[in-house]
Amino acid sequence: MAYSEKVVDHFNNPRNMGSFKKDEEGVGTGMVGAPECGDVMKLQIKVQNDTIVDAKFKTFGCGSAIASSSLATEWLKGKTIEEAQQIKNTDIVQELNLPPVKIHCSVLAEDAIKAALADYQKKADGALADAK
Amino acid sequence: MKLPIFLDNHSTTPMDPRVLDTMLPYFVEKFGNAASRNHAFGWAAEEAVEQARKQIAKLIKADPKEIVFTSGATESDNLAIKGVLEMYGEKGNHIITSSTEHRAVLDTVKSLEGKGKAAVTYLSVDKFGMVNPEDVRKAITAKTILISIMLANNEIGTINPVKEIGKIAKEKGILFHCDATQGVGKIPVDVQEMGIDLMSFTSHKMYGPKGVGALYVRKKNPRVRIASQMDGGGHERGMRSGTLPVPLIVGFGKACELCEQEMAKDTTRLIAMRDRLEASIMKALEESYLNGHPINRLPGNLNISFAYVEGESLLMGMKDIALSSGSACTSATLEPSYVLRALGVGTELAHSSIRFGLGRFNTDDEIDYTIKKVIEVVTKLREMSPLYEMAKEGVDLKSVQWAAH
């Protein structure tokens, strides 16, 4: 199977690869997938004043899974929480030209975004409750 | 050294230029039909086919009359299994095979099973991928008419104790078919000593042309009969009709002759290169696991799982080396290798496997390049892997609740 140029580019030059400390303030972590399915994505966001100021990923998976998560971090940076909620897997499919057999990679990336946002929200709500 | 490097010699092999030279006259100049009995064009073709039959038979210690030409190993497997079942159906319908056979055997018996024509026992293998001959013995019933066990596995290279299985088959008077596609030309094969009654093999895995293979069908002790699966002009003593592809057969014959002459030399070279590749990779990369038998394995085979990285991404990172992976992402089924699963290799490690297949034309420079590249890419992808990060932090990955999807 031939990969699209964009997939190859993200694979060879992954954007924002790495990790934040999970307990760092303003960091939300999403981890989705399973090793036995052949892909696990970890996506992290760093939020200040409702805006995602930084994002990082680590992915175990095929080239398309790596490219999908790399692209997701690129898109997340600078977005508000609400804007980030709007990222759809179909946007990723379109941007990376993913073939039908690789659509699950984009679904996983969307799930990872949602999970990171939910984790951030949970931590923020918890901090708020503690403050009260 | 030229890129890309071909290290996928289990899928196919490049043709030896000496084979091509032998084939060339049989396209334009000596184009006759080997079945034309009444003119010189036919005689020349027939002579060439019979010469090739001798070369092929010699390599496996058979009689030339026991070689039936087919289009390849898949057809040979189909012909052997369906042909025996049809011919000996009155005696029974039970077939014994193993779970790590090639799909040409597995899908054939499954199709017969699905149609209610055969009852099939699928023997499990040990952790090295080897069939236990005693398991074969235990599986035999009064209805058993065929045992079909491969010589060497195409993914992990493990060589089965075929001689012992052949002995049991003889003892019990049951026919023994061996899919020897990966073994013939690479390791010594003797159908007498191994007690094989039917054997499938193909030209393009041994530096010959694609599109031609053979089924060995024993003529004496016992005389094996099979029902033809292709009706027509009654070629190949009625077992496989169809005009013989003379140039391909001539090439197949030459390829067998070369394998016989050069096997000892090729084997020594391949084992030295393969062992160096294995040792260098394993030494440099922690948590790399060998799949298959450590000793009883094809000279050119090396199958390794690299924990925490996925196979397809490994292949993508090494795109100037042609390799194969047991990862689901590289298969049409989205399931990781059934062969590795049958060995008890965990699904996650099956996804992380790479098969290196060395052949006659690989060089030491290519192996050096591959060693360097594998270490570089695995290291890079592990840096990118959340699983590797967790393992380094001391998280037991098995204790994590994963959301399977």
Image (cartoon, coloured by chain):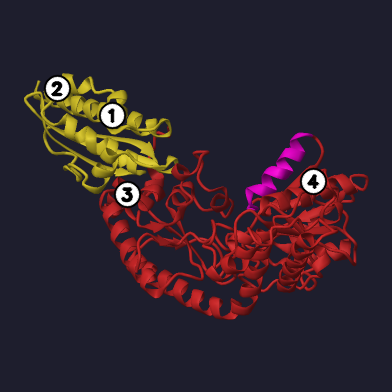
Chain colours: A yellow, B red
Mark 4 residue crowding within 10 angstroms, few (<14) / some (14–19) / many (20+)? many
User: Which labelled disc corresponds to residue A92?
Assistant: 1
Provide residue B211's location: percent of width, then percent of height: 63, 53
- The residue sitting at 89% across, 48% down in the picture is B87
Amino acid type at circle 1 is: Ile
Which residues fall within the magenta stretch? B100-115
Residue type, label 4: Lys
Using the image, tell me which numbered label, if any, was put on residue B82.
4
Between the C-alphas of marks 3 and 1, the distance is 31 Å
Q: Position of residue A77 (x, y in %)?
A: 13, 31
Side (left or right) of B302 relative to B213: left
The span from disc 3 to disc 4 (Cα, nearest Å) is 52 Å
Q: Which residue is mark 2?
A: A129
> Please, which residue is most extreme toward the left here?
A49
Image quadrant containing the N terminus of chain B: bottom left
Of residue B124 and residue B119, the one placed in the foreground of this image is B119
The amino acid type found where label 3 is placed reads: Val
Label 2: state its secondary structure.
Answer: helix
Q: Is residue B133 above or below residue A2?
A: below
Chain of the residue displaying label 2: A
Q: Position of residue B213 (x, y in %)?
A: 68, 57
Q: In terms of depth relative to the viewer, which is nearer, B231 or A17?
A: B231
The residue singled out by tag 3 in the image is B395
Between marks 4 and 2, how big is the CA–CA gap? 72 Å
The spot of residue B109 in percent (x, y) is: 73, 44
* Amino acid residing under circle 2: Ala
Q: Residues within 10 Å of mark 2 (few under 14, many from 20)?
A: few
Confirm whether circles 3 and 4 share one chain: yes
Mark 1 or mark 2, which is nearer to you? 1
